[in-house]
Amino acid sequence: MDPNNAIRPDYALPEFQGERQQLIDEGLTEQQATRSLTALWNFNNNAEKVRWTARQVHLEEARQRAEEDEAQRLQDLKDEEEATRLEDRKKNKNKYAPIKRGKVPSDPTILPAQYATRRLKAGDYCELHYFTNKGLDEAKVATLIAEPDALVMLPAADGVHSWVPAAAVKDPKAAPVTKDENLTWEEFNEVAPRIISFMKLTAGATHPTYSNKKLCYCTSRNNDVAGTLQ
């Protein structure tokens, strides 16, 4: 307990009669005994204050040394980690190469059947069914189960035969394709934005033209009037 907060007792009270009596038996009066007890308490309290102050100074110095030691330890650790990082940076330059931040595409990726992709790239007619929800789901399933290395031979427009992936050829045993005129309005609304986006992204499938001063996309340069409005 802090001796600076100690309260000096009143040695004139009856509870201290025993202490006073010991001094009275030595030849002191009642008042002298009370003053002697008070003086003795003050002496001891002052000594306790000195020891308390010295102890607090010692504790504060120890606390400061501990804080300084901890700060030095953390700084040494930081310096060691920085040296390790710089060494690793020298050895692995590619690891710290800056990453180019590109714009994240907002349009969903459209992955129709390879058969539909091949038809559009060749500028041939392709059923809208392949761009409906059902058609895209069928293409996803076909991708998972198709033989990735299977090839078939097909004749080109010039009569030359070439090998193409089997997935790019319409399978006669595949699920039936809904004709364009039999599509529902809901399915047509699914197809329209998808096929336009895919036609714009597919090299060779379309070319831009203008109709009534509005940008359109056509699948044939010989029939710009049949373009699709953007």
Image (cartoon, helix red, strand yellow):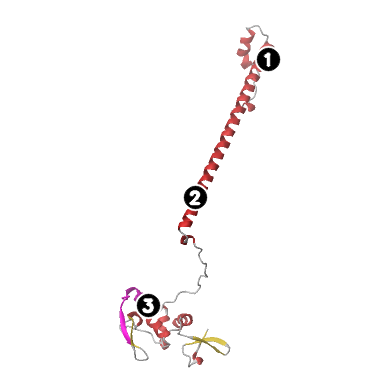
Q: CA distance from mark 1 to mark 3?
A: 108 Å
Question: Does residue 87 sit above or below 38 in this rendering?
Answer: below
Q: CA distance from mark 2 to mark 1?
A: 69 Å
- The residue under label 2 is which amino acid type? Glu
Instruction: Provide the residue span drawn in magenta.
Output: 137-154
Check disc 2 and report the residue beneath it: 81
At label 2, counting other C-alpha atoms closer than 10 Å, the crowd grade (few under 14, some 14-19, many 20 or more) is: few
Q: Nearer the viewer, mark 1 or mark 3?
A: 3
User: Can you give x and y, in whole percent of width and height, for residue 15 in the image?
Assistant: 61, 17
Compare marks 1 and 3 and give the one earlier in the sequence.
1
Check disc 3 and report the residue beneath it: 139
- Residue 146 horizontal side relative to residue 213, left or right: left
- Asked if the residue at tag 3 contacts the one at tag 2, i.e. Cβ–Cβ closer than 8 Å, the answer is no
Determine which quarter of the picture holds residue 53.
top right
Check disc 1 and report the residue beneath it: 35
- Residue 8 horizontal side relative to residue 180, left or right: right
Indicate yes or no whether the magenta region holds residue 203: no
Question: Does residue 125 sit above or below 60 in this rendering?
Answer: below
User: Can you give x and y, in whole percent of width and height, for residue 140 in the image?
Assistant: 37, 75
At label 3, counting other C-alpha atoms closer than 10 Å, the crowd grade (few under 14, some 14-19, many 20 or more) is: many
Determine which quarter of the picture holds residue 180.
bottom left
Compare marks 2 and 1 and give the one earlier in the sequence.
1
- Near-viewer residue (54 or 191): 54
Compare marks 2 and 3 and give the one earlier in the sequence.
2
Q: CA distance from mark 2 to mark 3?
A: 52 Å
User: Can you give x and y, in whole percent of width and height, for residue 33 in the image?
Assistant: 66, 12
